[in-house]
Image (spheres, helix red, strand yellow):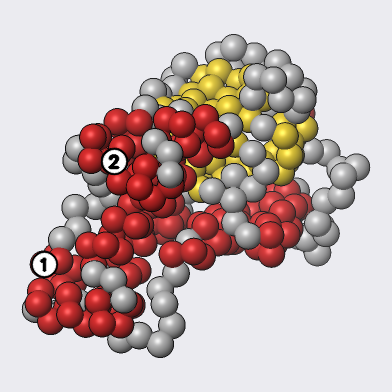
Amino acid sequence: MRAGGLPDTAAGDPAPPPGLVVVGRFDRPPGYAVHRPLGADSWLFTWTTGGHGRLRQGGTGARASAGHLVVLAPGVRHRYGVDPGARHRRFWWAHCQARPNWQDWLRPYAAGDGLYVVPPAPDAPRARIEAAFGRMLADARWTGTGVPPGESGAEAEPVAVAHSSAARELALCALEEAVLLAAAGAHTAAAPSPGVDERVRRAEALIAADPGAPHTVASLAAHVALSPSRFAHLFTQQLGRSPMRALREARLCHAARLLEGTDLPVERVAAASGFASPFHFNRVFRERYGTPPGAYRAIDR
């Protein structure tokens, strides 16, 4: 398949055939939309660099602004385009088969229906993420012989299909760097604290990796090979808050990210963040952020 033969914008737009690695850089005006009732046979990675976009996968929606990595898993109907009211959306995109470890990195940002929304990383990693996508676009053009092309400039063809096995592997390595940097950068605020016991560090990392999981003091203690009482004492002594308080804070931060980046109903945000009761979630969210979840989303947008 030639890059020029790839679909542009149409209802029922077919995705690239499975097995291909395809990457592109678009700057689309208002009204741009792609609709795939059957989804795609490959993963779709999108990273927004300007303007605003809307993406919907199954029954879950997301809003993408500069710095958002939004990933759509295969096999679920989806639609994406420029956010209504926005002047444009500038973004990178890539269709490919995801490497297994990428799903582990993305799991904390699962919004439901195979949609993953990674919030913006700090400014420093963004330059490297941009460079990684640029390198992916250049590497996808490599024939497999001679020297790989340099990073693509603005004048280059905005879409490339990696035909050779060498080009595919290089392009996937560049995308892997972008996904890792985005996921790790979004975890910066929840990174384990320095200067604490390694077992407490591991428990912190477990909470940060999946705050919506049904963690308990007993399950966290078992993970680090401590008794529940010893674990709770050590955790509280070194971090100044109990394991369950730390878990609640991580869940509230996760819920705030989902409210900022998706259109999930508040009840689903609560469930995805580990809160069994929407009423309890509303109360503790208001205590933490000074406003109920629905109002918080309205302020953010």
In this view, 126 is above or below 82: below
Q: Residues within 10 Å of mark 2 (few under 14, many from 20)?
A: some
Q: Which residue is mark 2?
A: 283
Task: Check the picture and name the quadrant holding the C terminus.
Answer: top right
Residue extending farthest to the right is 155
Q: Which residue is mark 1?
A: 218
In this view, 185 is above or below 64: below
Question: Is residue 102 shown left or right of residue 158?
Answer: left
Between 224 and 146, the residue placed more toward the observer is: 224
Contact (Cβ within 8 Å) of mark 2 with mark 1? no
Q: Residue at x 60, y 36 (%)?
A: 64
Between 90 and 36, the residue placed more toward the observer is: 90
Between 266 and 162, the residue placed more toward the observer is: 266
Locate residue 46, reporting x and y percent.
60, 40
The reply to whether residue 298 is visible in this rendering is yes
Identity of the amino acid at label 1?
Ala
Q: Residue at x 54, y 41 (%)?
A: 70
Image-quadrant location for residue 31: top right
Identity of the amino acid at label 2?
Arg
Residue extending farthest to the top is 11
Circle 1 — which element? Answer: helix
Between 79 and 211, the residue placed more toward the observer is: 211
